[in-house]
Image: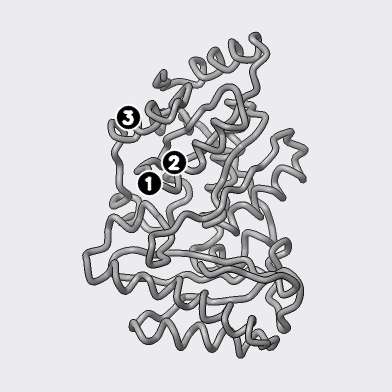
Amino acid sequence: MRTLRTIAAVRAHVAAARQAGRSVALVPTMGAFHAGHEALMRAAREQCDDVVVSLFVNPAQFDEPGDLAGYPRSEARDAAVAAELGIDALFAPAVGEIYPAGFATTVRVGGLADVLEGAERGARHFDGVCTVVCRLFGIVAPDVAFFGQKDAQQVVVIRRMLRDLAIPVRLEVVPTVREPDGLALSSRNARLDAAERDRATALARGLEAVRAAVEDGERDAAAAIAAGRAAMATDGVQPEYLAIVDPDTLDEAATVSGRVLVVVAARVGPARLIDNVLIDTEQVTTPL
């Protein structure tokens, strides 16, 4: 595996792959790899000939300076994990390589980026996400890009960006990877102490309570959400939001029908965590 620091080096790597007739995948990450990242890399490795993993803690998408400063960084370990998984290139640029002096462009997706995470974190968050992802797509020009279902709203927003800007990249969404007790894997979990780690499972339990209510026949969204909030309250966790939305438009649902996305965000100790689950009322669902 090669570790690349510059746009020129990445483009040369991809050009060589294209010359050899190889398909190219991109796995965008902010590092601090866990099993969720590994699932993305394995999926990319299985589907494409050449896999580029980007490792860049994107300052443009952080709304809190403390969150940016506290975000875990472990490039040496991450590089070892990527190499073990057979990744071809790790793109680990400096901030100035992605945002050089005079950089003045922002990519904004209206509507979808203004609700849920956008409402809680402000427009800066998804503007930063879309800008850096668009820049990475321009640098790598992958055939396929791999994202995790845990960041469900991010996937919806990026999919709209791809459609609106006619960017020829296919998105592959990999299921959320969880701990045995249901906690969704996140780099931010490393900031939790033992007691906070136990309380963090409240997010998964809240989602499971919503799903259980729906499977028991509840179709009123407010009632199902109330069940989820009650489950979270047993651990003293108050969600910033817990909502049932359309998985494509993110519009809040009054009635649970067909496919819906249940999304939750909450602060536990120093970490702000998110999670979600898809429910299809026309199919049998499985536990988290």
User: Residue under circle 3?
Assistant: 80
Q: Quadrant of residue 107?
A: top right
Q: Residues within 10 Å of mark 2 (few under 14, many from 20)?
A: some
Question: On screen, 221 above or below 2?
Answer: below
Amino acid type shown at disc 1:
His
In the picture, the disc for residue 212 is none
Task: Choose the circle earlier in sequence order: 3 or 2.
Answer: 2
Residue at 52% across / 81% down in the picture? 209
In the picture, the disc for residue 34 is 1
Q: Position of residue 49 (x, y in %)?
A: 60, 22
Residue at 47% across / 64% down in the picture? 274
Amino acid type shown at disc 2:
Glu
Question: On screen, 207 above or below 236?
Answer: above
User: Residue under circle 2?
Assistant: 38
Quadrant for the N terminus, please.
top left
For marks 1 and 2, give the CA distance.
6 Å
Look at the numbered disc 3 and give the secondary structure of its residue: helix
For marks 3 and 2, give the CA distance.
12 Å
Look at the numbered disc 2 and give the secondary structure of its residue: helix
Q: Look at the numbered discs 1 and 2 and tell me whether their residues touch, using CB distance below 8 Å.
A: yes
Q: Residues within 10 Å of mark 3 (few under 14, many from 20)?
A: few
Look at the numbered disc 1 and give the secondary structure of its residue: loop
Q: Position of residue 208 (x, y in %)?
A: 51, 76
Q: Position of residue 71 (x, y in %)?
A: 32, 50
Q: Position of residue 217 (x, y in %)?
A: 68, 87
Q: Nearer the viewer, residue 107 or 41?
A: 41
Q: Look at the numbered discs 3 and 2 and tell me whether their residues touch, using CB distance below 8 Å.
A: no
Judge from the rendering whether residue 119 lies leftward or rightward of residue 191; answer left or right. Answer: right
Judge from the rendering whether residue 120 lies leftward or rightward of residue 168; answer left or right. Answer: left
Task: Choose the circle earlier in sequence order: 3 or 1.
Answer: 1
Q: How many circles with numbers are drawn on the protein?
A: 3
